[in-house]
Image (cartoon, grey):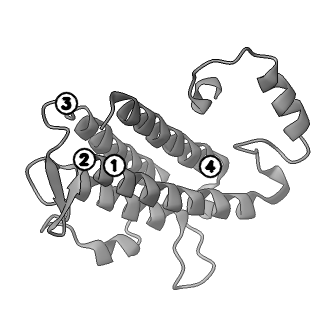
């Protein structure tokens, strides 16, 4: 894994974390736990699943399988949060586990295989797998939040009918290497 891949991946994870947080901040407590029907997931349940995955995948990820024996994935889809603070505390715990794990990646262990359900992955593959998984679920969080907030939604990207101005601002800057999240 190139150092630039790892640093870029960390920035992407930080970006998705911020999208989830900016969505949750816009929601009432009731909206955080809203489900369109009994089989659908609320944002709180999606958070619980994401964090369950993060804790399982990234705890001792260099030495233990990413699907831990203590993980009960099915329970991740049952709400047992009592309030917003529980959701936010759990959210932070999962992301902290991920970022602490990524700090363990070095030039010496970069080619080491890690396992998820006994399937070997290079660290690059494991990072890609989880980056895509987390982006998928954060996208769900944002979409549900957007639906619930309706006209009160504060856009997390380029608002409708603002692309021309956004692009003009970007093209006023000189060409240079930078990550798209640097300006956020």
The location of residue 97, given as percent across then percent down, is 27, 43
Where does label 3 land, which residue? 106
Say which residue appears at 58% left-offset and 50% top-offset.
24
The numbered mark, 3 or 2, whose residue comes first in the sequence reads 3
Q: CA distance from mark 3 to mark 1?
A: 14 Å
Q: CA distance from mark 1 to mark 4?
A: 24 Å
Residue 65 visible to the viewer: yes
The numbered mark, 1 or 4, whose residue comes first in the sequence reads 4
Q: CA distance from mark 1 to mark 2?
A: 6 Å
Residue 123 is labelled as 2
Where does label 4 land, which residue? 23
Q: Quadrant of residue 181?
A: top right
The N terminus is located in which quarter? Answer: top left
Residue situated furthest left in the rendering: 63
The C terminus is located in which quarter? Answer: top right
Vertically, is 45 above or below 162? Answer: below
Circle 4: is it few (<14), some (14-19), or many (20+) Cα within 10 Å? many
Circle 1: is it few (<14), some (14-19), or many (20+) Cα within 10 Å? many
Residue 136 is labelled as none
Where does label 1 land, which residue? 127
* Secondary structure category for the residue under label 4: helix
Say which residue appears at 16% left-offset and 54% top-offset.
114
> Badges 1 and 2: C-beta atoms under 8 Å apart?
yes
> Which callout, 4 or 2, points to the residue nearer the camera?
2
* Secondary structure category for the residue under label 1: helix
The location of residue 63, given as percent across then percent down, is 8, 50
* Secondary structure category for the residue under label 2: helix
Vertically, is 112 above or below 143? Answer: above
Residue situated furthest bottom in the rendering: 38
> Which callout, 1 or 4, points to the residue nearer the camera?
1
Circle 3: is it few (<14), some (14-19), or many (20+) Cα within 10 Å? few
Residue 82 visible to the viewer: no
């Amino acid at each position: 894994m190139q150092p630039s891949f790892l640093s870029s991946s960390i920035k992407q994870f930080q970006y998705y974390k911020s999208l989830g947080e900016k969505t949750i901040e816009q929601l009432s407590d009731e909206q955080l736990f809203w489900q369109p029907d009994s089989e659908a997931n609320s944002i709180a349940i999606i958070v619980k699943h994401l964090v369950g995955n993060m804790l399982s995948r990234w705890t001792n990820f260099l030495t233990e399988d990413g699907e831990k024996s203590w993980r009960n994935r099915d329970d991740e889809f049952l709400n047992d949060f009592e309030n917003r603070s529980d959701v936010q505390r759990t959210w932070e715990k999962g992301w902290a586990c991920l970022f602490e794990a990524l700090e363990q990646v070095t030039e010496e262990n970069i080619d080491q295989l890690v396992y998820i359900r006994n399937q070997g992955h290079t660290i690059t593959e494991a990072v890609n797998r989880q980056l895509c998984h987390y982006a998928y679920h954060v996208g769900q969080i944002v979409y549900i939040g957007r639906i619930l907030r309706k006209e009160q939604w504060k856009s997390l990207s380029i608002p409708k009918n603002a692309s021309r101005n956004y692009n003009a601002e970007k093209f006023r800057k000189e060409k240079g290497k930078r990550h798209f999240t640097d300006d956020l």
